[in-house]
Image: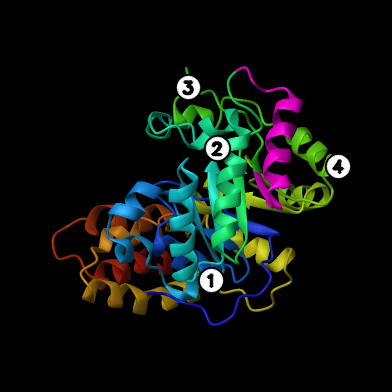
Amino acid sequence: MAQKTTRNKIDRRLSVAPMMGWTDRHDRYFLRLISQNALLYTVMLTTGALIHGKKLEILDYNPEEHPVALQLGGADPKDLAVCAKLGEQYGYDEINLNCGCPSERVQNGSFGACLMAEPQLVADCVDAMKQEVSIPVTVKTRIGIDEQDEYGFLTDFIGASAERGCEVFIIHARKAWLNGLSPAENRTVPPLRYDVVHQLKRDFPQLTFILNGGIKTLDGVRQGLMDTDGVMIGREAYQNPYFLAEIEREIFNTPDVRTRGEIMEAMMPYITRCLSAGVELKDITRHLLGLYNGLPGARRWRQVLSREAYLPAANENVVLEALKQIRQ
């Protein structure tokens, strides 16, 4: 079980979004080698999976990942309280409730973005979790759902949870269509409304608001930090992970940001350790494909990893061969 020895105040200026199928423990270990300061999030873990599944297998992570937050999916206050307590016991730095995912899976379970229609239930969930843990309990949400996208609907939602002690809200600055759009379309089709998040910060200055959605440049990060308390990077952090190094240098003034080569040198012992524990190489290397984006050899790097890491008995030599393409 991964544990941390101390819990310091979380720096929320930069975080990496929870992304299903992507931000697993291998990806988070990799991202931590790039960014010392980013707050990392798990993928959404449902209360049912945690309560009835193999808890150690689901919750375990690398101690190097700190600060790391556990995102929960669920709608039952008692179940969420149980899982929040588990998360704290396992050493997570924050518990986050997903109120923004629009997938069919969460709609069938009446959680995720569906919860925006039930602000009092969300407030009850927040309260139940806060009763069980001493670490922050936060909410990640959209700016609206379906036809319920007026500003008053959003402020009622925020206000209900704030009254029960939630102080941090991560706002994906798009509304979600629960009917008519796929999860992928919900990430791009509804227009971004940063102005709505800026207004929330003006109307609730005592709360912490993190801006999420469509931020892909350093200028975008800087602008977000001018108007809100932090920014959350999504797919850009996965598809172009070295973007986080740029933020480290320019926003956090970190002097010793690793080069791409140094990142891979640090990854190799981790890869060896995981392979010895039975992890398949492809489960790690799929997160590394974008590291050399835009550099000579990047295409060959991706080709070697994408093809050879999936072969039976693939080992560290595949990664070394891919690195040769960059050096050449």
Residues tagged 1 and 2 counted as in contact (Cβ below 8 A): no
Mark nearer the N terminus (1 vs 3)? 1
Q: Taking 97 as reference, is 297 above or below it?
A: below
Residue type indicated by callout 1: His
The alpha-carbon separation of the residues under discs 3 and 2 comes to 14 Å
Instruction: Name the residue located 66 percent from the left edge and 58 percent from the top edge.
Output: 14
Quickly name the residue at label 3.
181
Which quadrant is the C terminus positioned in? bottom left
Separation of disc 4 and disc 2 at Cα?
Answer: 22 Å
Residues at marks 1 and 2, CA–CA distance in whole angstroms: 24 Å
Q: Residue furthest left?
A: 312
Q: Determine the residue positioned at 58% across, 20% down.
A: 146
**In percent of the image, x 46 and y 31: which residue is there?**
183
Cα distance in 3D space between marks 4 and 1: 31 Å
Query: Which residue is label 2 attached to?
Result: 100
Magenta highlight range? 147-170
**Mark 1 highlights which residue?**
66
Of callouts 4 and 1, which one flags the residue occurring earlier in the amino acid sequence?
1
- 194 lies above or below 18: above
Magenta-drawn stretch contains 200 = no
Q: Mark 4: which amino acid? A: Arg
The residue carrying mark 4 is 202
The amino acid at mark 3 is Leu
Q: Amino acid at mark 2?
A: Gly
Spot occupied by residue 217 in the image (x, y as percentages of width and height):
67, 49
**Nearer mark to the viewer, of 3 and 4:** 4
Marks 1 & 3, CB-CB < 8 Å contact: no
279 relative position to 130: left or right: left
Tell me which label, 3 or 2, sits earlier in the chain.
Answer: 2
Report whether residue 303 is seen. Answer: no
Label whose residue precedes the other's in the sequence (4 or 2)? 2
